[in-house]
Amino acid sequence: MSRVAFIGLGVMGYHMAGHLARAGYAVTVFNRTRARALQWSAQFGGGGAAAPAQATAGADAAFRCVGDDDSVRAMVRGPDGALAAMRAGAVLVDHTTASAELARELAAIARETGVGFVDAPVSGGEAGARQGVLTVMAGGEETDFTRVEPLIRSYARAARLLGPAGAGQLCKMVNQICIAGVMAGLAEALHFARRAGLDAEAVIDVISQGAAQSWQMEHRHRTMLAGEYEHGFAVDWMRKDLGIVLNEARRNRATLPATALVDQFYADVQAMGGGRWDTSSLLARLERTTEDKA
C-alpha cells in the first residue's frame, strides 16, 4: 500500500495523517474546513481534496476520524462519499468513536462494493496522536486488518484485532467505562486530600508508586490541582462516548450504574460552562459543590 486518503483533520486526525506522510505514504486529505486541509498540506506536503470521494479515488486505504455516527455516514455515503470512489480491494478504516451498530452497517455496505472495512477507534488523546503512540482497537476481517496494520503502526504503539466488525467500537466502550470510573475516583481523592489538609502533591507522589497508580493520576493530577482544564479530551466528547456506551448497555443488558452516574457528573460540568474542559474537570465540580455548601 502506498496511496492513502485521510478524512477528518481534527485534533487527532491532523497528527495521524501527518505520521502517515512522514512514514513515506502518499497522503491525500479532506477536511470540511478547507483552511485546515491547506494548513496540513503546507506542513506535510500531501495533497488536498474538495470531497471525500476525491480523496479516496485510487487509494489503497482510506482512514477516517470524524465526530459521530451522523458525521461518519455523511462522509461515506452518496456520490461524494468516501466509498463512491474506492476501488475493489481497498480498505476503509474508521478511527471515529462511534456505535458498534454503525460499524456493522458500514462493513456490510463496503463489502457490497468489494472494499474491506475495519472499525478502529483510538485511545491516547491529542498528545498520543501528536507523539504517534496511540492505542488502536480494531474490528473486522483479519485479512483487511493485516493489510492496514503497518500503516496504523505509523501512529500507534499498540494495535489489535479483537473480533468482527463492531468489536473495535465495543472495546473502546470498555476503555471509556474504565476512564470514567478512574477519573471520578481521582477527582474525589484529590478533593478529599485538600479538605483533609494534606499536601496533595506529596500524597500523589507516594500513592502513585502503589496499587492506586493510573495514567490519569500520572498525567492529570498536577493540572487538576492547578485548576487547569483547557486541554485534553473535552467533556462534550466524553458525554458523547458515554452515551454510546449506555445505549449499547441497554441493548446487551449490561448493568453500568457507576458509568451512568459519572455521565451525570459530566452533565454538571457542562452546566458550569465546562463542555470544552478536559475530563479531569470533575474536580472542579466537587469544589464548586463544596463552595455552594459553605
Image (cartoon, rainbow, N blue to C red):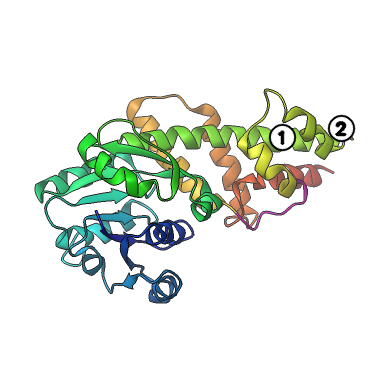
- Quarter occupied by the C terminus: top right
Task: Determine if residue 63 is in view.
Answer: yes
Give above or below for 59 relative to 136. below
Based on the picture, tell me whether residue 282 belongs to the magenta stretch: no
**Mainly helix, strand or loop, the magenta region?**
loop
Task: Determine if residue 141 is in view.
Answer: no
Q: State the image quarter where residue 184 is shown.
A: top right
Tag 1 near tag 2, CB within 8 Å: no
Q: Amino acid at mark 1?
A: Glu
Relative image position of residue 282 (x, y in whole percent): 66, 43
Residue assigned mark 2: 196
Front residue of 16 and 263:
16
**Highlighted range, magenta:** 225-231
Q: Which residue is drawn at the image coordinates 39% and 30% (left, top)?
A: 249
Distance from label 1 to label 2 (Cα)? 12 Å
Front residue of 81 and 149:
149
Relative image position of residue 52 (x, y in whole percent): 26, 65
Count of all numbered marks drawn on residues in the image: 2
Relative image position of residue 6 (x, y in whole percent): 33, 60
Q: Which mark is residue 188?
A: 1
Q: Which residue is drawn at the image coordinates 33% and 38% (left, top)?
A: 138
Q: Which mark is residue 157?
A: none
Q: Secondary structure at mark 2?
A: loop
Based on the picture, tell me whether residue 230 belongs to the magenta stretch: yes
Relative image position of residue 68 (x, y in whole percent): 37, 52
Q: Secondary structure at mark 1?
A: helix
